[in-house]
Amino acid sequence: MHIVVCVKQVPDTKIIKINPKTNTLDRRSAPAILNPYDAHAVQAAVSIREKTGGTISVLSMGPPQATAVIKKSIEIGADRGFLISDRAFAGADTLATSYALSKALEKINKEMPVDMIICGKHAIDGDTGQVGPGIARRMDIPPVTNVIEVSEVNLEEKTVLIKRKLSNGYELIQAELPCLLTVEKEINQIEYSPMPNMIKAARYEPVIWAVSDFENVDRSQLGLKGSPTIVGKMFTPPRPEGGKKIEGSVDEQVNQLMDILMEKKDVLTLQSSK
Amino acid sequence: MNFDEYRGVWIFIEQNDGKIEGVSLELLGAGRKLADKLQVPLGGFLLGSGIKPLAKQVIASGADEVYMVDHPVLKQYRTESYMQGVMLLVEKYKPEIILYGATPNGKDLASAVATDLVTGLTADTTMLDVDVDSRLLEASRPAFGGNIMATILCKKHRPQMATVRPKVMKALEPEPGKVGKIIEESIDLKEENMRTKVLQIVNDVTKKANLAEAHVIVCGGKGMGDVQNFQLLYELADTIGATVGGTRDVVEAGWLPHELQIGQTGETVTPKIYFAIALSGAIQHVVGMKNSDLIIAINKDPNAPIFDVATYGIVGDALEIVPKLIQQFKQLQNEKGGEVSYAREI
């Protein structure tokens, strides 16, 4: 079983600060981390490997410092990692990203056939969730998004049983291998990394590929050039006027709020319990 | 690519078990405005098995035309079978704009279709407009991390596509007698060629429906300080029959499960009363709650953006105000008997 997990380095949105004057991100304020959903994707691959054996490869696209997220994935339990890094990839939207990653996947697949690709549901810096299904189309394998459980992997039949989250519950899907999954956080808990993984990660140097390492690349589909979407403008939405401020001491404020809630029509009412 | 061949605004009509999803009707409302501005027909397209009776509802909800692919293999949503149907329709009829609800299935389908059509797709849009001269779709969404919106354009590819957050756009009042054109296309699909099978669908209404259908929501932010203080909000919610939700920060901190997150990457809610307590009102949060009827904000910071969308704002310490509020409600219940809850005026 060969599983490839696609991971992304993102700024930690929990910590990132906004420059209140320009309304833009102060990127220096945020450390770069492994996209949290991708950590769960690596962990999901580790859990599958425990049952099936095999190899977990990690693939990322980004600047050279993105090797950090590959090392982090090795810490969680991946076996090896690949980083594709080239100025030609810069400015890629989701379509150009899935194209670039699929070129790397083709190369990995040639060397060791891929049975499953796992991605996080989305990256916390873009929140799109579009790259995973895009890769699946380009590799011509079925995508299953929003996965909350991988219940069974049958290597003889080459099938996998998956629970997929829906707006209102979930569905149980049987998919043929190879397939691509995108996972939700609830699929697992990230386990503490065992010491040997930490040591391996610290010393690990991922393979780094540039565009020139790929065969049959259409450069017009890469990076900014290959991205159909562009940011037209950025704007601060018109500030609504805002409502009434309730003033006074804390007790006065609470009393006024009670009046509004209990005495206005169509708000809260006291219903007698019979 | 000859852009003039592409005309019309299309909405993906998502149906499950013969029931049209609310977001699809909302998008017919939003799409109607875009189509009128561009002076083109509004089309709704739907796929499934035995879906013909739904055409009337699509027309009554705003569409001029309904495009349908009806086939037993399309009974349940699957990326590969559905996208074959969509590709068939889009390549034949060439709409210039396609909108999908940002549901799990809508996002999945749109992402796959965009790849095969080689066109742009904007995710989780919350504002839509068109520029009549350039005929460009202006799909806006909150930009990552700031109180700022980004308008995404797709200038060199057609169709222009976007997924749109549920409960942000407004559905039209249905016009039952409205007449429209119904176009059916047949498709050749074989079950044995399908690489995925849906074995079972389990509707678990308990978790999600709570927030989506709650009349009163008490939503807390990181300003509550810690998970112990956050329990105050449960007490308030219990007292007035409300449901508790939280911001992304609160969910990331592990105070609440993800199902209870309100905002861009969580749930969009439209309750009658929304308490926004100790949360600043980042745009990612506001897009998920701003259509609530009555918004009451409590925050220490008088400049918190939540006050801009609040109907009533209290500048103050939630840890002081909330306990007093709970006490007042309890006192009221003890004095007069009964329970406080939301009730529609009869």
Image (tube, coloured by chain):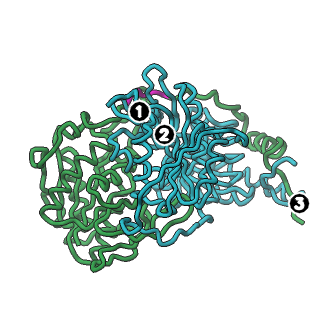
Residue position marked by numbered label 1 in the rendering: B152
Q: Give the amino acid at mark 1.
A: Ile
- Measured as percent of width and height from the top left, residue B86 is found at 44, 48
Dot 1 falls on a residue whose secondary structure is: strand
Instruction: Find residue B70 and report its horizontal and vertical position in percent.
Output: 52, 56
Pointers 1 and 2 in contact (C-beta within 8 Å) = yes
Same chain, labels 1 and 3: no
Amino acid type of the residue that numbered disc 3 sits on in the rendered structure: Ser
Q: Chain B is drawn in which colour?
A: cyan
Total numbered circles:
3
Residue B125's tag is 2
Whether labels 1 and 2 share one chain: yes
- Residue depth check, mark 1 versus mark 3: number of the one nearer the observer: 1
Residue drawn 52% across the image and 57% down it = B48
Gap between marks 1 and 3 measured at Cα: 53 Å
Most prominent secondary structure in the magenta stretch?
Answer: strand
Mark 1 and mark 2: Cα distance apart in space:
9 Å
* Image: magenta residue range: A231-236
Looking at the image, which residue is at 54% across and 51% down?
B14
Q: Chain A is drawn in which colour?
A: green
Residue designated by label 3:
A272
Looking at the image, tell me whether mark 1 or mark 2 is earlier in sequence order.
Answer: 2
Question: Does the segment drawn in magenta span residue A233?
Answer: yes
* B195 within the magenta span: no
Residue type, mark 2 in image: Thr
- B306 shown above or below B192: above
| Residue at image location 69% in from the left, 33% down from the top | A245
**Residue at screen point 25% across, 47% down:** A99
**Subunit under mark 2:** B
Left or right, A253 with respect to A216, comes to: right
**Distance of mark 2 from mark 3, alpha carbons?**
44 Å
